[in-house]
Amino acid sequence: MCFNVARMEVHKTALVDHPVESMFDLIEAAENYPQFLPWCASAVILERTDTIVAARVVVNYHGAKFTLVTRNPKRRPEWMAIDMEQGPFRRFAGNWHLSPLGADGCKIEFRLHYDFASPVLARVAGPVFDRIANTLVDAFVTRASTLPRPVPPAAIAAPTAPAQPLRPPPPELPPPEPGPQTPPTTQD
């Protein structure tokens, strides 16, 4: 019996009302994946520089459990590759492209090509991983919607006018009338 391991390809795009830098940082921060990706049991950053991020991610979802180590070249905020160093795949490569759409939005484009190293693993983990790969962009868009929106740099640097009172101040009261004076007391 001959079993042909199917090569899978995912191509997803999304328009997001979050700045490109915020979305890139969300995608690049694998250490936070367990907080919002139900399939991610753990994630550890192995190395992070201005040009690369490497991580170990443990997938544990619907009976499929495996570890994936990636070393991903990056150019913040517009591009990050996904390159597998260790894992159950014969091929696992992709990339994220992010394009700004004004100051407060961006377009995300995600591509991933993968196939499992063994036919048995493809049968067991394939349907689960296909679901993960096909919903990944949606998961990041959903996560971004739950995070506070960053303050644009122009708003931070711009001088602000003094706050105006909501109602006019009360009229000034006349000074108190002099009353009997109490002599100061001294303590010994």
Image: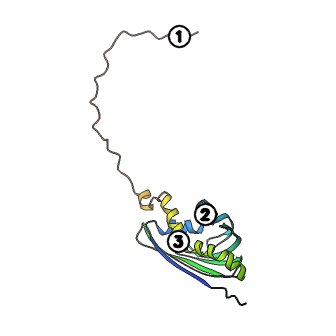
| Residue at image coords 56%, 68% | 27
Residue 130 rendering spot, x and y as whole percentages? 60, 76
Dot in front, 2 or 3 = 2
Residue on which the image places disc 1: 186
For residue 13, above or below residue 143: below
Q: Amino acid at mark 1?
A: Thr
| Residue at image coords 42%, 72% | 101
For residue 154, above or below residue 126: above
Q: Tell which of 155 and 83 is nearer to you.
A: 83
Screen quadrant of the N terminus: bottom right
Asked which quadrant contains residue 52, the reply is bottom right
Residue on which the image places disc 3: 137
The CA distance from mark 2 to mark 3 is 14 Å
SS of the residue under disc 3: helix
| Residue at image coords 64%, 70% | 49
Q: Amino acid at mark 3?
A: Val
Q: Earlier in the sequence, mark 2 or mark 1?
A: 2
In this view, the residue farthest toward the bottom is: 2
SS of the residue under disc 2: loop
Residue 53 rendering spot, x and y as whole percentages? 64, 71
Q: Earlier in the sequence, mark 2 or mark 3?
A: 2
Q: Tell which of 139 and 1 is nearer to you.
A: 1
Whether residue 117 is visible here, answered yes or no, is: no
In screen coordinates, is 73 left or right of 102? right
Residue on which the image places disc 2: 38
Whether residue 151 is visible here, answered yes or no, is: yes
